[in-house]
Image (cartoon, helix red, strand yellow):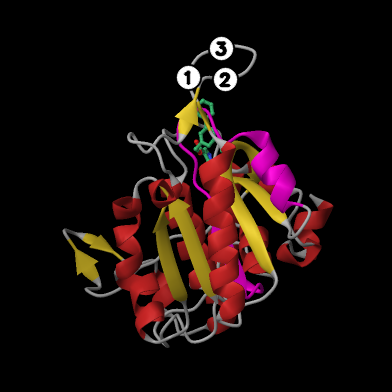
């Protein structure tokens, strides 16, 4: 997968050089290019924003630099054999970013992120590129950040860990909270590891029983309990088999 990020704060994307994404890059699973939007400004102050038409607070990111930057990134990508890019625009007004969307994005060969600052990007930029590729405006949550760069880190990590060969054997996304199967759409239950007793706190007996059926049921019940407490909205999306026949008759 190729990832391009166009931003006025390239240093904000340094974390893409470490940990999971850093390893995926080192293994050649991910080709990440970070570009400074101001490289496509030609005035003395490297201006990327201006006052909003119609008035109102804050500033809006101008079309010119974005257009030149994206055309340049696209030309470079196509030249190096990349194809079918998608534009990812983090914004509070976007489609909720979910594991389902992470899976969809992980299947694409090329993602171009355009994190915005200020009040956002002139709408004509997204309209222009929507004629040539899918444009995903995504929200990582119901809050307003000063810029989309943190959202790029979130989306990139969620997508990268799904790429083949990125997660080591010790880790797996198959049991993700939102992965398909009986635990689909349930939140993670509690997890434990050695020592068996810590500050007088021991491990639930069932986990030491070696009875895989009972352990699976206990884990599902704990996941249901946690989901009911923290995310009741996810319960009705649960797959029916996540409940026993007895549960259904309740
Ligand atoms: C592209 O347009 C944007 C992008 C961002 C940065 O992203 C987020 O905040 C975000 C992404 N998921 N969840 C939050 C912020 C605004 C914005 C809106 C109103 C006032 N101030 C700023 C507009």
Mark 3 crowdedness (10 Å alpha carbons): few <14, some 14-19, many ≥20: few
**Above or below, comparing residue 216 to residue 201 in the picture:** below
Badges 1 and 3: C-beta atoms under 8 Å apart? yes
Tag 2's secondary structure? Answer: loop
The foreground one among 14 and 18 is 14
Q: Nearer the viewer, residue 6 or 138?
A: 6
Foreground of the two, 165 or 129: 129
Instruction: State whether label 3 is within 8 Å of ligand 1.
Output: no
Instruction: Tell me which numbered mark, 1 or 2, is placed earlier along the sequence.
Output: 2
Q: Secondary structure at mark 3?
A: loop
**Residue visible at 56% across and 41% down in the picture:** 64
The residue under label 3 is 56
Q: Is residue 113 left or right of residue 128?
A: left
User: Which image quadrant is residue 201 in?
Assistant: bottom left
In the image, is residue 118 part of the stretch drawn in magenta?
yes
Asked if disc 1 and disc 2 are in contact, CB closer than 8 Å, the reply is yes
Disc 2: which residue: 52
Instruction: Look at discs 3 and 2 and give the one toward the viewer.
Output: 2
Above or below: residue 184 compared with residue 230: below
User: Seen in the image, is 193 located left or right of residue 5?
Assistant: left
Mark 1 sits on what residue?
Answer: 58
Residue 67, disc: none
- Looking at the rendering, the stretch of residues picked out in magenta corresponds to 106-130
Label 1 CB-ligand 1 distance < 8 A: yes
Residue shown at the point (61%, 34%) measured from the top left = 122
Mark 1 secondary-structure assignment: loop
Alpha carbon separation for disc pair 3 and 2: 7 Å
Whether residue 171 appears in magenta in the rendering, the answer is no
């Amino acid at each position: 997968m190729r990832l391009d990020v166009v931003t006025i704060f390239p240093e904000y994307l340094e974390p893409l050089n470490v940990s999971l994404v850093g390893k995926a890059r080192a293994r050649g699973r991910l080709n990440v290019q970070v570009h400074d939007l101001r490289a496509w400004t030609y005035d003395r102050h490297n201006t990327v924003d201006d006052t909003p038409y119609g008035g109102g607070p804050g500033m809006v990111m101008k079309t010119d630099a974005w257009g030149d930057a994206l055309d340049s990134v696209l030309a470079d990508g196509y030249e190096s054999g990349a194809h079918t890019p998608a534009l990812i625009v983090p914004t509070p007004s976007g489609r909720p970013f979910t594991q389902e969307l992470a899976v969809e994005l992980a299947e694409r060969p090329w993602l171009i992120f355009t994190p915005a600052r200020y009040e956002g990007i002139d709408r004509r930029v997204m309209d222009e590129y929507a004629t040539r590729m899918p444009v995903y405006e995504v929200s990582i949550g119901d809050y307003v950040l000063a810029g989309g760069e943190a959202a790029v880190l979130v989306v990139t990590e969620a997508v990268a860990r799904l790429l083949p060969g990125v997660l080591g054997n010790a880790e797996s996304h198959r049991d993700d909270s939102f992965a398909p199967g009986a635990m689909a759409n349930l939140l993670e239950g509690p997890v434990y590891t050695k020592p068996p007793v810590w500050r007088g706190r021991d491990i639930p007996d069932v986990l030491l029983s070696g009875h895989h059926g009972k352990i699976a049921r206990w884990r599902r019940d704990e996941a249901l309990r946690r989901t009911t407490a923290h995310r009741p909205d996810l319960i009705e999306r649960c797959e029916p088999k996540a409940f026993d026949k007895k549960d259904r008759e309740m």
